[in-house]
Amino acid sequence: MKQSAHKAILMGALALLGLAASQPSPFGARLEAAVRSGGEPYAQVLSAQDQAQRLCTQHRSQIPGALLPQFLQEQKALIRYPRGGMLLGEWQNGEKVFTDPKRGNCYACHQGDPKQLAYGTMGPSLTNYGARGQSEAVVRYTYEKIYNAWAYVPCSLMYRGGVHGLFTPEETADLVAFLVDPSSPINRR
Amino acid sequence: MPKSMPLTLLLAATASLFALSQQEKPLDPFEEAMKQRQQYLQTFGILPGDLFAAQGEELFHAKRGPKGKSLEGCDFGLGAGKLEGAYARLPRYFPDTGKVEDLETRIVSCMERIQGFKPEEIKRDEVVALTTFVASKSTKAKIAVRPQHPAELAMYNLGRELWYTRAGPRDMSCAICHDNYAGKRVRLSPVMSPKEGLGSEWPAYRFEEDRMYTFENRIQFCYTSVGIPAPAFYSEPQIALTTYILAEASKAGHSFQELPFFTR
């Protein structure tokens, strides 16, 4: 009898704790209501934020030093590689993915093929990227940066295209080839 | 609508004008817009945005809706029917609806309360024309959005949070481009921060799209171009972001452009 009363109190306390943990702050609740008023499709995407997006939001895209090692490690763990481990694909297909606004959309921010004049300037120019060579280190860095930019620069504007499935691991390897292959238009003189 | 016929014809005719002006090397976007604007003026003697404003003016004064009233009784914050400079102080809190409203939302609430329209009867095209007309009365006005009422401050805070929210398949937020990379370009379009006067050019006629874009249209365009479904018209994310952006532009001392503006 006494034991079951204890148990009930304990359960009640746990329920309260759980509730407190899952209850957003008053501001959080107000924000959630505002987002819902934007309509179901909008609310769904905003409430589907992953942990990394939440941290970048909370810290205004400046992750505190103490959280950096874990952040980078978790992002690195999200990188998938092509079957067979070949990180260098075909530049011709890479160019398509690079250009396609629904996939890479890389010209939004980067200069690439010097013939393409409608390029953005928010990212560094990638024209003549191949000057870096094709060493294993260059290829691996390029692959991982493209697949998950946040594994190198947390909360960067450059998005995690591979993580979000905008392109597959194989297509990521094609993008790498578009950047480093000497016969790619990015590197042709 | 008697005025919509010549408007459609005129807009159709401009498509060929646009095609003619396409060149191999892209111009500076501002220069290009100015050039296009000149061509419209020389060819037609009037800018497309001014046609929308004229359409809005006609709608504003017409007795319409189940109650057969004009919108002259609509208070945009400075008193019923007072339009000069009203847009420059929106969004703001309205005691009659108990809500913070931007211009577009205010027009809708007046169409409902004064003219008796049901929400589903309100046509977006009419709201756009009315918005263009009322905003034209704040041409070159100093932007003066200064949240003071608790509801305005709450809306500003919500807008600021949304501004920084990273979300969607492209990990985007407003801030990551418009603050961190202000002054750069996305493709050929210049990216501005609120401090640099982001928001001062809407509503505008976008010649590339051949359409009027209000502030809410522009926010929707931003969201969809980064892969996030746009928040609905007249919803709180729209009003919150508008409040935040224009309050920041106000702090930096910016004025509106010639409204309706003409842009890429």
Image: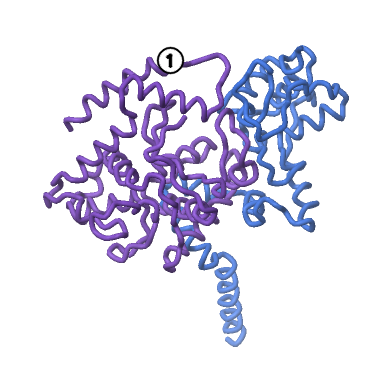
Chain colours: A blue, B purple
Residue A98 rendering spot, x and y as whole percentages: 65, 24
Q: Residues within 10 Å of mark 1 (few under 14, many from 20)?
A: few
Q: Where is residue A6? Give x, y as percent.
A: 61, 83
Identify the image quadrant of residue B148. bottom left
Location of the C terminus of chain A (image quadrant): top right
Instruction: Please provide percent x and percent y for residue B246.
Output: 47, 52
Type of amino acid at the residue the image marks with label 1: Ala
Residue at 25% over, 45% down? B120
Residue under the point 26% across and 21% down: B9
Kindly state the secondary structure of the residue where label 1 is placed: helix
User: Residue at (58%, 44%) from the top-left corner?
Assistant: B178
The residue that label 1 is drawn on is B19
Image quadrant holding the N terminus of chain A, namely bottom right
Answer with left or right where residue B155 lies relative to residue B5. Answer: right
Q: Which one is nearer the viewer's eye here, A78 or A38?
A: A38
Q: Does residue B240 lie above or below B34 as drawn?
A: below
